[in-house]
Structure formats: structure tokens, C-alpha cells
Amino acid sequence: MRVSVLALAVCLIVLPKILSAQEGNRALPDPFTFNSGQKVKSVREWERRRKEILEIMTHEMYGKAPERPKNMRFEVFDLDKDALGGKATRKQVTVHITEKGKEAQFDLLIYIPNQVKHPVPAIIGINFIGNQAIHADPGIKLTTAWVEKSGMFPCSADGKAGDACRGVNASQWAVDSILVRGYALVTLYREETASDRKEFAFQTGVHTLYPELQQREDNFGTVAAWAWALSRGMDYLETDRNIDAKRVAVFGFSRLGKAALWAGATDRRFAAVLSNESGAGGGKQFRRGIGEDINRLCTVFPHWYARSLGKYKGKDTELPFDQHFVLSLIAPRPVYLATAEDDKNADPQGEFATARAADAVYRFLGTSGFPDVPFPALNQPVSGQIGFHIRPGGHDVKMFDWIQFLNFSDLHLQK
């Protein structure tokens, strides 16, 4: 009997510790715990912790980006005040960046609604296949950068943009709906800013200006370069009197949704973030171990993130950070995560879990955070300061997605 009592006493002491350790392994890293182990107790302390989180995500995942360039100029080469049948003013602007005698440049395509009082809020995002692909408008300059041909992006077979490329990606860019709601639309092309072809990684666009950043283990990854280019687009918008630069949302789909989230995390000038099916390295939790993983990111797309991320291959469920840290960097600004039922790689449940995990930071900073609700049914958006929906279908941007983004933006950006 004495042995049984002793065994029971040991169990009562040890078992809770074992269970606690197991629970700790499953638990997400706490955004409120400093690297020292101390806890955040005030908003002032949160600012210090936020800097730590930014350093963690920069050094362990996205890579070191350059500061805002000192030698940058904007060339407005097109201005049509009667574009799209009079609905919009079209501007096209080349961003020129010079460093140590080298220059990189990329174009902004801007549509500003004519029917509303200026300055207007705006939505800026990177496109997949060239500015000319988002609308059939013949006035849009054809990109001279390489263009992809695929099932989702049908275009020229020789990698060059021609008239056949005009409007081929229009279904993912609800230009008319955006303008009717009173928003300007701003877009730029991924290949003009940084190549998405791994055989040409770091050899084109803005990467050519900062070769020293590729010598680091936390090198300037392509997702970070796209995010950095979005910030340079914001630099221009701050000079445009027709746009209210304090009401600019950054948008992205798929890998460009990853860039949009990182742009929002690193540049507080973006007033809101709209991420569509950004998946691994974007909105979904790695630590669930479901969908696209770090091994695939580092193997198939080794240029997207810093080389330092490679040490976590096969260790997704053990990460000392996760994507709720990125949302915490965006907080308290509004962020929306959109997903789709058949997009298994992006793990819709994992994106919902990230929204829930970021809720505590948003509430700590005085916002409504993310509603305490179960995973929603299809086409039933959930919205607080963090928004979320899942719709039927696969990896794409549909009108339903844009309607939710615009509704969300109306709540947070319209005066």
C-alpha cells in the first residue's frame, strides 16, 4: 500500500509537468515573451518586443532588406484623364533607383477614379504577368521584362509581352469594382522588381543594386524584395496629390500575398493588408505541419526566402516563430486573410489559426481583434480588425474575394 501511495504521489507531481511540457511543444511561440523570457506588460514594452520580432523574422526567414534609397526619382510618362471611357485617370510612372552607378527601374500603373472627390484611398499590389495583363486598356505600356506562360497566365510563348498579353489576367483584378467603390488601383510587375525564376534569382531588378546583401546568411530574399518594391511604390504615392497616402491598403495573391503581408509588417505606412491565399510563408501556420512546408519552399523556391530559413527544413512543427508573428508586426492595423476550400497547400484552417493566434496582440493594442467564432462556413466572412473568409474553389482571386476586400476596406479606410 505504501508503494502504491508513493507511486501515486510521484504521478501527481511528475505527470502535470510532462503534460505541461507536451502542451508547450504544441503551443505557438508567444509574441508577448521577450527573448530574455520576460513578459510584455505595457504598450511601450510592446514596441521593444515588436523590434525583437521584426529582427527574428528578418534574420530567420525573409532576409535583410536595404534602407529607403537616397537616389530615387519618379518619371510620370503617361497621363490620361479620360481613361476607361472617362471613369478613371490613368497614370504610368517609372520608379528609377540608383546605387553606386547602377540603376534599376520598374513601372507603376495607376488608375484613379474620376467620379469621387480627391484625394482618394488606394489599393496597391504586385501582379504576376505584367501591368498590361490586368486590363485590356491599350494605353498600358507593355512590359519589356520576361513574362510567364502557364495555364493560369496564358501569354506569349517566347517570354515577351505582346498585344496578346493584354487583359489576360483581368479576372483577378476587379478594376471597375475598385474604381466604383472610390479607390485608386496601383500595380507593379514582379519580374520588373525581382526575378521569380530561380535560375535568374538575384540577377535582375532591385537585387542588382545590393549584391553585398546576398553574401549574408540572412540574404535579401525575393519575397522581401517584392515587399521592398511595394514600399517604393508607397514612396511615390506620398507625392501624388490625388491619392491619400495615409489610406493605402497593400494587396497580394499567392506568393505575392506573402510579399503583401511582409510589406505591411515592415512598413507601417500601409494602412491595411489584404492577403489572398498566401499560404506557407504568408498567412498559414507552419507549426500545424499541414500543406506546403519549409522543405518545399527552400527546395522549389530557394530564392523566395533567406538561406537562413533552410536550417528549419523538416522542423516546421518546432519553429521558434510562426506567421502570427507577422500579423503581430502589422497590428493594430487591419489585415484580411482570404482562403479557398480546395487550396489545400495553403491550408485554410492554418490561415484561420494564424488569425486567431494574432488576436491577443490586436486586443492588447486596443482593437476588436478577431471574433471568437468557430471555423466559418463557405462564403461567410468573419470580420473584426482581422478579417477572414473561405470560399468554394481553388487557388485564384475571384470577385467574391474582392467584394470582401472592398467591404473590409470600406470599414477601415473610407472617411
Image (cartoon, helix red, strand yellow):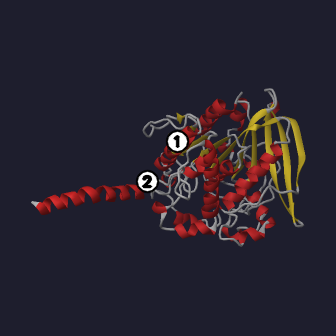
Residue depicted at x 65% and y 70%: 217
Indicate left or right for 94 with 360 as reference. right
Tell me the CA gap for discs 1 and 2.
15 Å
Residue depicted at x 54% and y 51%: 31
Residue that label 1 marks: 359
Q: Which residue reaches farthest front?
A: 2
Instruction: Work out whether 140 lies above or below 181.
Output: below
Residue depicted at x 70% and y 54%: 227
Whole-percent x and y of residue 201? 70, 68
Q: Residues within 10 Å of mark 2 (few under 14, many from 20)?
A: few
Q: Dividing the image into 4 quarters, which one contains the N terminus?
A: bottom left
Q: Dividing the image into 4 quarters, which one contains the C terminus?
A: top right
**Three-letter amino acid code at disc 1?**
Asp
The circle drawn on residue 27 is 2
**Three-letter amino acid code at disc 2?**
Ala
Q: Residues within 10 Å of mark 1 (few under 14, many from 20)?
A: many
The circle drawn on residue 232 is none
Indicate left or right for 224 with 376 as reference. right
Q: Dot 2: what SS?
A: loop
